[in-house]
Amino acid sequence: MESRSHSSRAQLALDEGGEAMLVVGTNLRLGHATDAGADIPLWGDLGEHVLEFTLEESFHGGARWCIRGPGGPGDPDLGQDAEVPIGSGGGVRLTQPGTASAAGVLELSGSLDAEGARRVLLVPPGAGGSVRMGCTPDCHLLWKGMTPESHVELTVEEEEGGLTLHLRCAEGLRVPGGELETHWAGPFPPCERVEIHLGDPDSTASPCALCLSPGSHPTIDSGPA
């Protein structure tokens, strides 16, 4: 059997964009949450169905995620944009919103969920796998900044033998109690829950928080009642 690249994952929650499981790698196996070998662990009735997601270079430009059955490279590519049924629990639909990024969005249907989330972000390490948050069609998650063109960029880079998550936002971002910056970096997956506020707190735009968690269902701290 073909060896698979190492993967890492975390949970992400965004006030406006909802929740998603964030999985970093280029050769990922989807399976039941009780399967220790699953890179994309899902809860629900999957039956015996297992899918392999492989990032491959496309002759038409850029890298493209391919979906195959448990047979691996010998199985046909099931394609993007159409739902792939899984057991009796529902199905998955893969899209790549932007041609400039190799990151993909896996939408879950039916009773399937990824630790409470209904989406999985497939993120190759490096600048080419950036996840964009904003309002334009090439964005992976919804975020409303000061202008329709505003966006937040998330990348996971291989640095010093490990993975580092980078967040960049021209309008500013900060951890609670910290200074306003345009860049934040931390280990991936995070060792503990991290909350980052997006945008300039002095602007008229609604405040938005992004939460990263090493696992389980993330929540946003709304402060004292």
Image (spheres, helix red, strand yellow):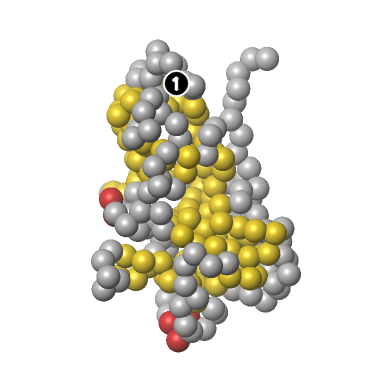
Left or right: residue 152 versus residue 116 is: left
- The structure residue drawn at horizontal position 44% and vertical position 48%, both measured from the top left corner, is 140
Out of 36 and 102, give the one closest to the viewer: 102
Look at the picture and state if 206 lies above or below 162: above
Quadrant housing residue 175: top left
Q: Secondary structure at mark 1?
A: loop
Left or right: residue 8 versus residue 115 is: left
Locate the C terminus and report the quarter of the image it occupies: top right
Quadrant housing residue 15: top right
- The structure residue drawn at horizontal position 53% and vertical position 54%, both measured from the top left corner, is 120
Whether residue 76 is visible: yes
Look at the picture and state if 194 lies above or below 114: above
Out of 61 and 75, give the one closest to the viewer: 61
Query: Label 1 belongs to which residue?
Result: 205
The amino acid marked with disc number 1 is Ala
Quadrant housing residue 31: bottom right
- 10 Å crowding of disc 1: few (<14), some (14-19), many (20+): few
**Relative image position of residue 135 (x, y in whole percent):** 42, 39
**Relative image position of residue 177 (x, y in whole percent):** 44, 16
Look at the picture and state if 32 lies above or below 181: below
- The structure residue drawn at horizontal position 40% and vertical position 28%, both measured from the top left corner, is 145
Out of 68 and 8, give the one closest to the viewer: 68
Whether residue 35 is visible: no
**Relative image position of residue 6 (x, y in whole percent):** 42, 63
